[in-house]
Amino acid sequence: MAPPPAAGCPVTERAAPDPDRPVVGLDMRLGDDLRTVTGTETVALTPDLPVDEMWFRLVPNAPQSAGHRLTVESVRGDLVTGGGYVDEGAAPGTPGGLYRVDLRETVPAGQTVSVELDFRLRLTAERTPAGFDRLGVDDGVTWWGSGFPLLTWEPGHGWAQDPMVEVSGETTAGPAADTRIRISVPDDLVVLMSGDQAEPRATADGRRVWESSDPVARDVLVAVGEFDTATVDAGGTRVTAGVLSGADSSAEELAETTAEAIEVLEGRFGPFPYPTLAVPLVGDGGGGEEYSSAFVLGDDDPGLVVHEAAHMWFYGMVGNSQFRDPWLDEAFATFAETVGDGHTDADDLDRRGAVGGSMASFDDQDEYEALVYGKGAAALAAAREAAGEQAFDEAVRCYVESQAWTIARPEDLARAPGGPGACTRRPGGGRRPGPTGRRGRRELSRPAPDAPEGGTRLGSRPPAVGPGQRPGGPLQGPAAGPVPRLRPRLGSRPELARGGEDGVLLRGVRRTGSLNGGGRGSFLSSSAGHRRAARRAGRG
Ligand SMILES: [Zn+2]
């Protein structure tokens, strides 16, 4: 247990990961067809609540990735009696969105249970509904993020059994796990993946095996291709970028762009969370997807790089339930895009609807991205302006350092400085008191309860502004000061509420140079725009 913070945050010492966090091993093989991955996953879980089942999320079976398919071929373990799929909104034709492993007896808190799963991932080269997707096959490259059964344990809370949704976005809650990865690939291909990679070694069957370790991985990205790579040092972080032939950027340029992003983000949010970062560029005109110590890019736009790099703090280090509280990582990552030039546009605050809903609360992709990315980032920027830059930045830094390697909740953000007992580190690096690990699914899927009464502290709940409502406490900063009255001017610009196509969608965020002009892509002034347009256009 880390020492308690000194009175009067900000915490300057980063919380350590839970010493009893899960241990995960992934032993994978990419077939010669470059679209079949077979593997064995070992998981040792030491739960902080009693468990009599184990649950895994099969992300490739989500509707947004229809065409890909992840199956569990077998499951073993001393306590394992069997297992089975649960549909939970998975794409038709897939076996299900969740996989349950049944245990012979209840495992008490503090005891370790180990299981081993054989899995098979079948990737399609066809376009999926996501457009640019976390998994894919293209000329000279195969990549997969979340391409294995993902342990879905939330310490102090239990199993996250949230349904899959039609909206294209993450729905995962996963603990930081001590993770080792081994992957066998054809010998002419290069692997870029999560974790600190070792040099590859040749095997007798004419292939090469690549290994890495990430002691705090929530999820894993692997990209295998004819990459040209370059490595640069970014203030102690080893950044390795990889590009394919014909890419707009060289590997050196992409590595430098990433290093610059890290530098500017460290100035605001503290030291980069990982010793290494892998950045494979696998397409042209796509978006990006974040993983632990790695992100995959479908475009080399510098703003997109900043967004995905910011996710290493918000998602990677400070985890969240991406189903329950997607704004905790996406609003912050979008807000982070403004770090370089500091400009946002308060017009995004005019949008109808709440930022802080779960993934199940948004009607469609436009609404999700406009509210969670656009309005969420604008609200954070407004809070910074209201609180004062220094006070706000210190509060965020306190939140980041104190919640490192946990799955944070909005109320953790609310405990940033400004109130009694503010910003305290949770003992045990992610352990929090919770009544049971065996709640029913409906209960687990329920949106988080509202923040504590008062609502006068930073982030005490997300800025929920609906028709006829006046935003109140959520936008107040941690320091005393005037309450920003951000009265929605509803109806003044109806096109904004629908999500415009003319550059207004997220115009508050940083504009960058390499816009993909024309058609529906003409508003590409942000990474969110990139993701959105890419999905529509099916590029990447
Ligand atoms: Zn993002």
Image (cartoon, rainbow, N blue to C red):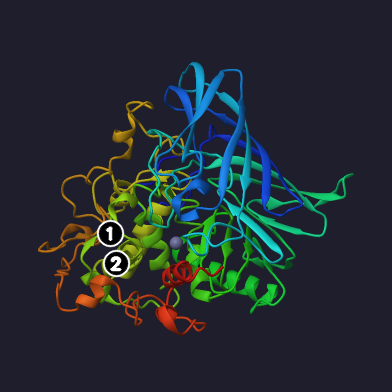
Q: Mark 2 packing: few (<14 Cα in 10 Å), some, or many (20+)?
A: many
Which quarter is ligand 1 in?
bottom left
Please state, as top left, top right, bottom left or bottom right, where the C terminus lies in the image. Answer: bottom right
**Residue drawn 26% across the image and 59% down it:** 478
> Given contact means CB atoms under 8 Å apart, are the residues at marks 1 and 2 in contact?
yes
Left or right, 351 with respect to 377, comes to: left
Q: Which residue is mark 2?
A: 375
Residue situated in front as seen by the camera: 444 or 273: 444
Residue situated in front as seen by the camera: 233 or 91: 91
Locate residue 455, reporting x and y percent.
Answer: 19, 52
Q: What label does residue 484 carry, if any? A: none
Q: Quadrant of residue 193?
A: bottom right
Q: In this picture, is 134 found above or below 153?
A: below
Q: Residue furthest right?
A: 204
Q: Earlier in the sequence, mark 1 or mark 2?
A: 1
Label 1, ligand 1: CB separation under 8 Å = no
Query: Looking at numbered disc 2 in the image, what kind of residue is underneath it?
Result: Lys
Locate residue 204, reporting x and y percent.
Answer: 90, 44
Locate residue 56, reporting x and y percent.
Answer: 50, 36
**Residue drawn 46% across the image and 46% down it:** 92
Disc 2 is placed on an element classified as: helix
Label 2, ligand 1: CB separation under 8 Å = no
User: What distance separates the C-alpha of mark 1 from that of mark 2?
Assistant: 7 Å
Q: Which residue is mark 1?
A: 355
Query: Looking at numbered disc 1 in the image, what kind of residue is underneath it?
Result: Val
Locate residue 516, reporting x and y percent.
Answer: 49, 81
Asked if residue 10 shows in the view, the reply is no
Disc 1 is placed on an element classified as: loop
